[in-house]
Image (cartoon, grey):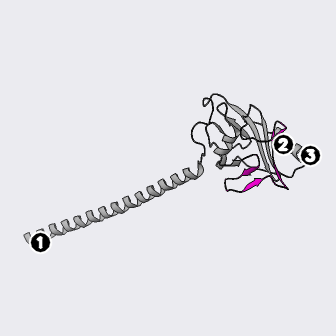
Amino acid sequence: MGKKEREEREQERETFYEKHQKQQFKYKAIGIGVLAGIVAVLVVSSYNFYELSSHVVPQGMPPGAGALGGINTHAGLLTMIYGQQFDYSSPAYQVKSRYIDFEKGDGQTVHIHASNVTMGFLFDSLNIGLTDKCFTFPDKRSFCTDDKYSLKFFINHHQVQDLRNYVAKDNDRILISYGNENATQITSQLAKLDSFTLS
Protein backbone atom coordinates (compact mmCIF):
# COMPACT_ATOMS: atom_id res chain seq x y z
CA MET A 1 0.00 0.00 0.00
CA GLY A 2 1.43 3.31 -1.08
CA LYS A 3 1.83 6.43 0.95
CA LYS A 4 -0.87 8.18 -1.03
CA GLU A 5 -3.41 5.41 -0.38
CA ARG A 6 -2.58 5.47 3.34
CA GLU A 7 -3.15 9.21 3.44
CA GLU A 8 -6.46 8.83 1.58
CA ARG A 9 -7.58 6.13 4.03
CA GLU A 10 -6.55 8.27 7.02
CA GLN A 11 -8.51 11.14 5.57
CA GLU A 12 -11.56 8.91 4.99
CA ARG A 13 -11.34 7.68 8.59
CA GLU A 14 -11.10 11.23 9.91
CA THR A 15 -13.99 12.33 7.72
CA PHE A 16 -16.10 9.35 8.88
CA TYR A 17 -15.17 10.04 12.51
CA GLU A 18 -16.07 13.74 12.17
CA LYS A 19 -19.39 12.87 10.53
CA HIS A 20 -20.10 10.33 13.26
CA GLN A 21 -19.26 12.88 15.98
CA LYS A 22 -21.47 15.53 14.35
CA GLN A 23 -24.33 13.02 14.05
CA GLN A 24 -23.99 12.02 17.71
CA PHE A 25 -23.92 15.66 18.77
CA LYS A 26 -27.02 16.33 16.67
CA TYR A 27 -28.89 13.40 18.28
CA LYS A 28 -27.81 14.53 21.75
CA ALA A 29 -28.97 18.08 21.04
CA ILE A 30 -32.33 16.80 19.80
CA GLY A 31 -32.64 14.52 22.86
CA ILE A 32 -31.81 17.37 25.25
CA GLY A 33 -34.30 19.64 23.46
CA VAL A 34 -37.07 17.04 23.70
CA LEU A 35 -36.26 16.38 27.37
CA ALA A 36 -36.26 20.12 28.14
CA GLY A 37 -39.64 20.43 26.40
CA ILE A 38 -41.09 17.57 28.44
CA VAL A 39 -39.75 19.06 31.68
CA ALA A 40 -41.22 22.47 30.75
CA VAL A 41 -44.63 20.91 30.03
CA LEU A 42 -44.53 19.01 33.34
CA VAL A 43 -43.57 22.13 35.29
CA VAL A 44 -46.35 24.21 33.70
CA SER A 45 -48.89 21.40 34.14
CA SER A 46 -47.92 20.88 37.79
CA TYR A 47 -48.17 24.58 38.49
CA ASN A 48 -51.59 24.82 36.80
CA PHE A 49 -52.83 21.74 38.69
CA TYR A 50 -51.62 23.23 41.97
CA GLU A 51 -53.29 26.56 41.23
CA LEU A 52 -56.60 24.95 40.24
CA SER A 53 -56.71 22.39 43.01
CA SER A 54 -55.47 24.42 45.94
CA HIS A 55 -57.35 27.66 45.88
CA VAL A 56 -57.27 28.61 49.52
CA VAL A 57 -59.03 31.94 49.67
CA PRO A 58 -58.16 32.96 53.22
CA GLN A 59 -54.42 33.31 53.67
CA GLY A 60 -52.65 32.80 56.96
CA MET A 61 -54.25 32.65 60.35
CA PRO A 62 -57.99 33.22 60.77
CA PRO A 63 -58.78 36.40 62.73
CA GLY A 64 -58.78 35.68 66.48
CA ALA A 65 -57.80 32.01 66.05
CA GLY A 66 -55.85 30.15 68.69
CA ALA A 67 -52.66 28.20 68.12
CA LEU A 68 -52.71 25.77 65.20
CA GLY A 69 -53.04 22.25 66.61
CA GLY A 70 -54.31 23.60 69.92
CA ILE A 71 -57.55 21.64 69.60
CA ASN A 72 -58.91 18.75 67.55
CA THR A 73 -62.66 19.25 67.32
CA HIS A 74 -65.09 17.44 65.02
CA ALA A 75 -68.51 18.66 63.90
CA GLY A 76 -70.99 17.10 61.50
CA LEU A 77 -72.13 19.21 58.54
CA LEU A 78 -74.94 18.42 56.11
CA THR A 79 -75.86 20.75 53.26
CA MET A 80 -79.06 20.01 51.37
CA ILE A 81 -79.97 21.92 48.19
CA TYR A 82 -83.47 21.13 46.88
CA GLY A 83 -83.36 17.91 48.91
CA GLN A 84 -80.00 16.77 47.43
CA GLN A 85 -76.89 16.42 49.59
CA PHE A 86 -73.99 18.67 48.63
CA ASP A 87 -70.80 16.58 48.37
CA TYR A 88 -67.83 17.97 50.30
CA SER A 89 -65.89 14.71 49.84
CA SER A 90 -64.59 15.63 46.38
CA PRO A 91 -60.92 16.77 46.17
CA ALA A 92 -62.08 20.33 45.43
CA TYR A 93 -63.21 20.67 49.08
CA GLN A 94 -60.60 18.61 50.91
CA VAL A 95 -57.95 20.22 53.20
CA LYS A 96 -58.17 23.80 51.94
CA SER A 97 -57.09 25.32 55.27
CA ARG A 98 -54.87 24.00 58.02
CA TYR A 99 -57.19 25.54 60.61
CA ILE A 100 -60.56 24.07 59.60
CA ASP A 101 -61.24 21.53 56.86
CA PHE A 102 -62.70 18.32 55.47
CA GLU A 103 -60.13 15.49 55.37
CA LYS A 104 -59.40 12.01 53.99
CA GLY A 105 -62.25 12.03 51.49
CA ASP A 106 -64.83 12.51 54.26
CA GLY A 107 -67.39 15.14 53.35
CA GLN A 108 -69.41 14.95 56.57
CA THR A 109 -66.91 15.77 59.32
CA VAL A 110 -65.53 19.27 59.79
CA HIS A 111 -62.11 19.12 61.48
CA ILE A 112 -61.19 22.19 63.54
CA HIS A 113 -57.51 22.47 64.49
CA ALA A 114 -57.48 25.81 66.34
CA SER A 115 -59.84 27.59 68.70
CA ASN A 116 -62.10 30.46 67.61
CA VAL A 117 -62.18 29.48 63.92
CA THR A 118 -65.58 30.32 62.44
CA MET A 119 -67.71 28.42 59.97
CA GLY A 120 -67.44 31.48 57.74
CA PHE A 121 -63.69 30.88 57.49
CA LEU A 122 -64.36 27.27 56.44
CA PHE A 123 -66.63 28.37 53.60
CA ASP A 124 -64.22 31.10 52.52
CA SER A 125 -61.46 28.48 52.32
CA LEU A 126 -63.73 26.33 50.11
CA ASN A 127 -64.47 29.31 47.85
CA ILE A 128 -68.17 28.95 48.71
CA GLY A 129 -70.14 32.10 49.36
CA LEU A 130 -72.28 31.91 52.48
CA THR A 131 -74.45 34.68 53.90
CA ASP A 132 -77.64 34.60 55.93
CA LYS A 133 -79.58 34.68 52.63
CA CYS A 134 -77.42 32.93 49.97
CA PHE A 135 -75.33 29.82 49.41
CA THR A 136 -73.10 30.34 46.34
CA PHE A 137 -71.13 27.58 44.63
CA PRO A 138 -67.59 28.26 43.36
CA ASP A 139 -69.04 28.37 39.81
CA LYS A 140 -71.20 31.33 40.99
CA ARG A 141 -74.54 29.49 41.02
CA SER A 142 -76.47 31.01 43.92
CA PHE A 143 -79.29 29.68 46.06
CA CYS A 144 -80.87 32.62 47.81
CA THR A 145 -83.94 33.14 49.97
CA ASP A 146 -86.86 34.45 47.90
CA ASP A 147 -90.67 34.15 47.79
CA LYS A 148 -90.58 30.41 46.98
CA TYR A 149 -87.43 29.04 48.61
CA SER A 150 -85.44 29.77 51.75
CA LEU A 151 -81.97 29.16 53.11
CA LYS A 152 -82.13 27.77 56.64
CA PHE A 153 -79.51 26.95 59.28
CA PHE A 154 -79.79 24.53 62.19
CA ILE A 155 -77.25 23.90 64.95
CA ASN A 156 -78.06 20.83 67.07
CA HIS A 157 -81.71 20.97 65.89
CA HIS A 158 -82.14 24.67 66.76
CA GLN A 159 -82.75 27.04 63.87
CA VAL A 160 -80.39 30.04 63.77
CA GLN A 161 -80.34 33.13 61.55
CA ASP A 162 -76.73 32.93 60.37
CA LEU A 163 -73.78 30.55 60.45
CA ARG A 164 -70.77 32.63 59.40
CA ASN A 165 -69.68 33.71 62.89
CA TYR A 166 -70.43 30.39 64.57
CA VAL A 167 -67.50 28.53 66.16
CA ALA A 168 -68.35 24.83 66.14
CA LYS A 169 -68.01 22.74 69.28
CA ASP A 170 -67.10 19.07 69.46
CA ASN A 171 -69.83 16.79 68.10
CA ASP A 172 -72.02 19.71 66.91
CA ARG A 173 -74.47 18.88 64.15
CA ILE A 174 -74.93 21.67 61.60
CA LEU A 175 -77.55 21.63 58.85
CA ILE A 176 -77.73 24.02 55.90
CA SER A 177 -80.94 23.49 53.97
CA TYR A 178 -82.17 25.31 50.87
CA GLY A 179 -85.60 24.73 49.38
CA ASN A 180 -89.25 24.80 50.41
CA GLU A 181 -89.17 21.85 52.83
CA ASN A 182 -91.91 21.38 55.37
CA ALA A 183 -91.26 20.53 59.04
CA THR A 184 -91.36 16.77 58.36
CA GLN A 185 -88.75 17.04 55.64
CA ILE A 186 -86.47 19.17 57.85
CA THR A 187 -86.85 16.57 60.62
CA SER A 188 -85.76 13.90 58.13
CA GLN A 189 -82.69 15.94 57.14
CA LEU A 190 -81.78 16.44 60.81
CA ALA A 191 -82.14 12.69 61.42
CA LYS A 192 -79.78 12.02 58.50
CA LEU A 193 -77.28 14.47 60.00
CA ASP A 194 -77.57 12.80 63.42
CA SER A 195 -76.71 9.46 61.82
CA PHE A 196 -73.27 10.69 60.66
CA THR A 197 -70.30 8.94 62.24
CA LEU A 198 -67.72 11.68 62.75
CA SER A 199 -64.17 10.66 61.91
Q: Secondary structure at mark 1?
A: helix
Instruction: Please provide the residue range marked out in magenta.
Output: 132-159
Circle 2 sits in a helix, a strand or a loop, which is it?
helix
- Identify residue type, mark 2: Lys
Question: Quick one: which residue is furthest to the top in this view?
Answer: 70
In the picture of the structure, the residue carrying the numbered disc 3 is: 184
**Which mark sits nearer the N-terminus, 3 or 2?**
3
Q: Of circles 1 and 2, which is in front?
A: 2
Q: Is residue 72 left or right of residue 172?
A: left
For image coordinates 81% across by 47% down, the residue present is 177
In x, y percent, where is residue 8? 14, 71
Q: Earlier in the sequence, mark 3 or mark 1?
A: 1
The x, y position of residue 97, in whole percent, is 62, 40
Q: Is residue 100 left or right of residue 78?
A: left
Please, what is the three-letter code of the amino acid marked with disc 1?
A: Glu
Q: Quadrant of residue 196?
A: top right
Foreground residue among 142 and 191: 142
Crowd around label 2: few <14 · some 14–19 · many ≥20 (10 Å): few
Residue 85 is covered by the magenta coloring: no
Q: Tell me the amino acid under the disc marked 3.
A: Thr
Real-space CA distance between mark 3 and mark 1, rounded to the nearest whole angstrom: 106 Å
Q: Which residue is mark 1?
A: 5
Q: CA distance from mark 1 to mark 2?
A: 97 Å
User: Magenta stretch containing residue 141, yes or no?
Assistant: yes
Q: Are marks 3 and 2 in contact (CB under 8 Å)?
A: no
Q: Nearer the viewer, residue 44 or 121?
A: 121
Using a 10 Å C-alpha cutoff, classify the residue at mark 3 as few (fewer than 14 neighbours), some (14 to 19) or many (20 or more). few
Name of the residue lying farthest toward the left: 3
Residue corresponding to mark 2: 192
Percent x, y for residue 162? 77, 42
Q: CA distance from mark 3 to mark 2?
A: 13 Å
The reply to whether residue 104 is in sight is no
